[in-house]
Amino acid sequence: SAVISQKPSRDICQRGTSLTIQCQVDSQVTMMFWYRQQPGQSLTLIATANQGSEATYESGFVIDKFPISRPNLTFSTLTVSNMSPEDSSIYLCSVALSSYEQYFGPGTRLTVT
Amino acid sequence: GENVEQHPSTLSVQEGDSAVIKCTYSDSASNYFPWYKQELGKRPQLIIDIRSNVGEKKDQRIAVTLNKTAKHFSLHITETQPEDSAVYFCAAKPGFQKLVFGTGTRLLVSP
């Protein structure tokens, strides 16, 4: 597996502001992903972070709301922009070490007031 | 696209009993089926996986079976312990596409 860290681990933000979440991996990985998990729910893929190109977003998620950067093979950021209470959730980054196995970071618990 | 259904949504067992969680998938191109365990407040943890060229895989008390014809796969936990209490997610991956997750099963093991 890989050692995956996220910052911050949690945050409380005011509506209308933005938060950038960082994800760091201890080895180079091709595929990095960002997920959202609402309380008691399953994992919803927001986007695939591609190194050197724009992220690939899933239906219902747009770049203006969730801009993603992937400057190298070990790091990515997700920004949650112009936040509303509906954005309160856990945000998880994930990496694929091969074509199959996928591992998750510890998550960022976001509360928007 | 792929759709994964998972049952039951909750499962309560006594310590020492076996637990079985079942998932069905829709896309016959799916060839990888992982299972994740998520304890309260923690990240999803990959506990076992199976590829489509294998029918069964075991790792100590946990096993996964795959029936490609029926498009379903199951997680079996034997001799359950209180520390097995968690939410379990199945997932399926069609080829090089994204993982598609089931809705989760909350397993409660009572001492």
Image (cartoon, helix red, strand yellow):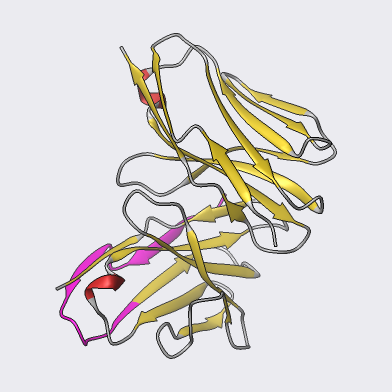
Q: Residue at x 55, y 47 (%)?
A: B102
Image coordinates for residue A2, horizontal then vertical, percent = 54, 54
- Residue A27 picture quarter: bottom right
Image coordinates for residue B79, horizontal then vertical, percent = 49, 11
For the question of whether residue A67 can be seen, the reply is yes
Q: Residue pushed farthest bottom?
A: A64
Q: Residue pushed farthest top?
A: B16
Q: Residue at x 61, y 55 (%)?
A: B100
Q: Quadrant of the C terminus of chain A?
A: bottom left
Q: Residue at x 31, y 53 (%)?
A: A39
Q: In the depicted view, which residue is nearer to us: B79 or B59?
A: B79
Q: In the depicted view, which residue is nearer to us: B44 or B27?
A: B27
Q: Residue at x 39, y 11 (%)?
A: B15
Q: Which residues are magenta?
A: A1-20
For the question of whether residue A26 can be seen, the reply is no
- Residue A108 picture quarter: bottom left
Does the magenta-highlighted stretch encompass residue A2?
yes
Does the magenta-highlighted stretch encompass residue A46?
no
Q: Is residue B13 above or below residue B26?
A: above
Image coordinates for residue A7, horizontal then vertical, percent = 32, 68
Image coordinates for residue B93, horizontal then vertical, percent = 70, 54
- Residue B60 picture quarter: top right
Direction from residue A23 to residue B110 in the image, left or right: left
